[in-house]
Image (cartoon, rainbow, N blue to C red):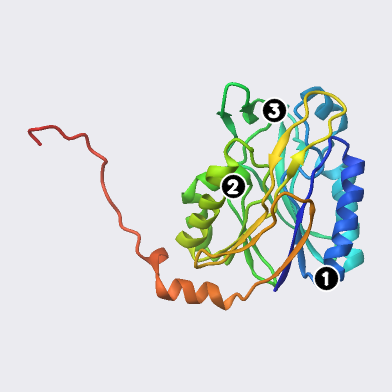
Amino acid sequence: MRVALIQMTSSDDPAENLGTMQDMLRRAKAEGAQIALTPEVCNCVSMNRAHQTAVLRHEGDDPVLAGLRATAAELDLWVLAGSLALKADPPETRFVNRSVLIGPDGGIAARYDKMHMFDVQVSVTETYRESSGYAPGDRAVLAQTPLATFGLTICYDVRFAYLYRALAQAGAQVLTVPAAFSPGTGPAHWQPLLQARAIETGCYVLAPAQTGTHTAQSGRPRKTYGHSMVIAPWGEVILDAGIDPGVYCVDLDLSAVADARAKVPALTHDRAFTGPFETGPDT
């Protein structure tokens, strides 16, 4: 299976970002990709809630999603819109951070709403409260396709190993982790977390990322870490895209999934346990 990871520097202008992605999708197809994956919030990177309210749409009338679906059908290409920032259905007033898998006919094959919200203070100057603007999902999603069985996740989810174990035990061969990763945590955590998820599950991990400084019409511009990655089921880094935007193609051999799991069948070694218990000098 030939995959293309699209690394980009999305602005806060959805129409501009759609044009960029459509050009990159055509490049991916020209390079033989069967599926192309975009990063998190590929339609709009913005730190300004008022601007997001003005430019974001509900899924049914989102022009970026409509454009990606049309391009997928035009190219006969599977496309994972790594995530789109979208307005939620009432009564929810926050947005949703939604990964959408689009088939080569332009149809929607799967949707996943990011479950774990990035509410952190990385440093004195870098604070995020994703839950103030986005409603968390509550449903893990597996997508069976002719190419492979995909487990869908997004960015901060990568820190929660139980989600990936559940996806792998349900049949996932490939785990997707589209991201807009913080440059404050990226150098220390991004690659080790991706490798850990691959090794624990015996899955390929595909992680297309946002990179660089994102142009903003309003509000302060955001910076992201880049380094889109593909990790093999044994933990090897097959691709590290660095910091330049572009289309990065890799060939995957799905037999490596079965091979890794045969060597270390950890997915079948779960044990029930009690506790943890507090212990003292007399216990």
Earlier-in-chain disc, 1 versus 2: 1
Residue at numbered disc 2: 139
Q: Relative to 85, say whether 23 is above or below.
A: below
Residue at numbered disc 3: 133
Badge 2: residue crowd in 10 Å (few <14, some 14–19, many ≥20): few
Displayed quadrant of residue 4: bottom right
Residue at numbered disc 1: 31
Residue at 42 percent of width and 64 percent of height? 267
Q: Position of residue 178 (x, y in %)?
A: 67, 50
Displayed quadrant of residue 204: bottom right
Q: Amino acid at mark 2?
A: Arg
> Residue 18 versus residue 7: which sits nearer the camera?
7
Secondary structure of residue under mark 3: helix
Badge 1: residue crowd in 10 Å (few <14, some 14–19, many ≥20): some
> Residue 67 versus residue 231: which sits nearer the camera?
231
Q: The C terminus lies in which quarter of the figure?
A: top left
Is label 1 in contact with label 3 (beta carbons under 8 Å)?
no
In this rendering, which labeled residue sits more in front, label 1 or label 2?
Answer: 1
Residue at 56 percent of width and 52 percent of height? 191
In this rendering, which labeled residue sits more in front, label 1 or label 3?
Answer: 1
Q: Position of residue 148 (x, y in %)?
A: 65, 70
